[in-house]
Amino acid sequence: MTVVPVQPLDVLSSPVRRTILDTLANLPVLAAADAPNRSTGLTAAELADRLNLHVTTVRHHLDRLVRADLVQTHSERTGVGRPRHHFTAHPGHLREVITPSAYKLLAEVLADALTSDAPDASEAGRRWALRNAPALLGDRASTTHAQTPGRWLSKVGALIDLMDAWGYEPTVTTTDAGRTADVCLHHCPMRDLATQNPAVACGVHRGIIEGTLEALGEGDATVSLIPFLEPDLCVASLTTANPFPDRSPSERPTR
């Protein structure tokens, strides 16, 4: 299996990963002579308990941090049973303040808008996505509608993967027999800009979603964006225009 390298710039665009790294970096150090100035670290379960997150979520973010060489892991055996993996911050790897990937993305979109006739930020975001999403999506790009709820959700999943890479923290729920996906965007990486100028930040968000869906073969899907439903939550509702055919009883799986 090929391991895709992870860049620290992309990893630290996530507020959750920044919080995990900050927690590990501020743990007390050992005073023992055989381990001076070193923390014992925390397990994924201990981090999950401290941060009030699900342990699976923490493991996902820890994996990204380890692959970016920002966090180290070592095993410790305490009594009988399998050794437990402990995680510590990798010292000396945060040499400068970095710009989150979302702001880099915004700069690219707005730079494109200045050299085109895009009438607003939403259209600028859509055009940027149409130019760039196919390369980012790879073989997930498509020209055809999803014919089943599962296939539609796999396209939404591809969109969520891109948004996660850009620094958003999306989660998804479905309604309307799977035809509508409500994507909850937690901790917007451009929150300050969105608060001061929602027409720009939220317009770019919506346009990128629309353009990415178009690159996935769902250009006529309905997209609605509700900003700041809560202080750290925006919701994008995505509804496919394709009515999924109702399978006959003989086509439905049996137990």
Image: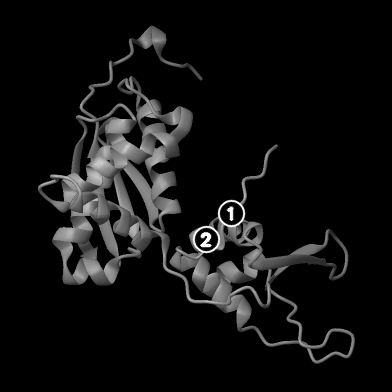
Label 2 SS: helix
Look at mark 1 in the image and give the residue it sits on.
Answer: 6
Q: Amino acid at mark 1?
A: Val
Q: Which mark is residue 11?
A: 2
Which residue occupies 62% across, 45% down? Answer: 4
| Residue at image location 45% in from the left, 52% down from the top | 165
- On screen, 96 above or below 157? below
Do callouts 2 and 1 mark residues in contact (Cβ within 8 Å)? Answer: yes
Residue sitting at the far front:
115
**2 displayed left or right of 228:** right
Tell me which numbered mark, 2 or 1, is placed earlier along the sequence: 1
Residue 155 in percent (x, y) is at 38, 33
* Type of amino acid at the residue the image marks with label 2: Val
Residue 235: % across, % down: 25, 53
Could you say whether the residue bearing mark 1 is in a helix, strand or loop? loop
Residue 205 is marked as: none
Question: Is residue 212 at all visible to an observer of this figure?
Answer: no
Q: Give the percent coordinates (x, y) of residue 188.
A: 32, 63
- Using the rendered view, name the quadrant where residue 14 is placed: bottom left
Q: Sort mark 2 into few (<14), some (14-19) or many (20+) by Cα contacts within 10 Å.
A: many
Quarter where residue 159 is shown? top left
Above or below, comparing residue 90 to residue 58 in the picture: below
Q: Is residue 153 above or below residue 164?
A: above
Find residue 88 and report its horizontal and vertical position in percent.
Answer: 69, 73
Badge 1 local density, few (<14 within 10 Å), some, or many (20+)? some
Quarter of the rendering occupied by the N terminus: top right
In the picture, measured across the screen, residue 90 lies left or right of residue 235, that is right
Q: Residue at x 17, y 49 (%)?
A: 122
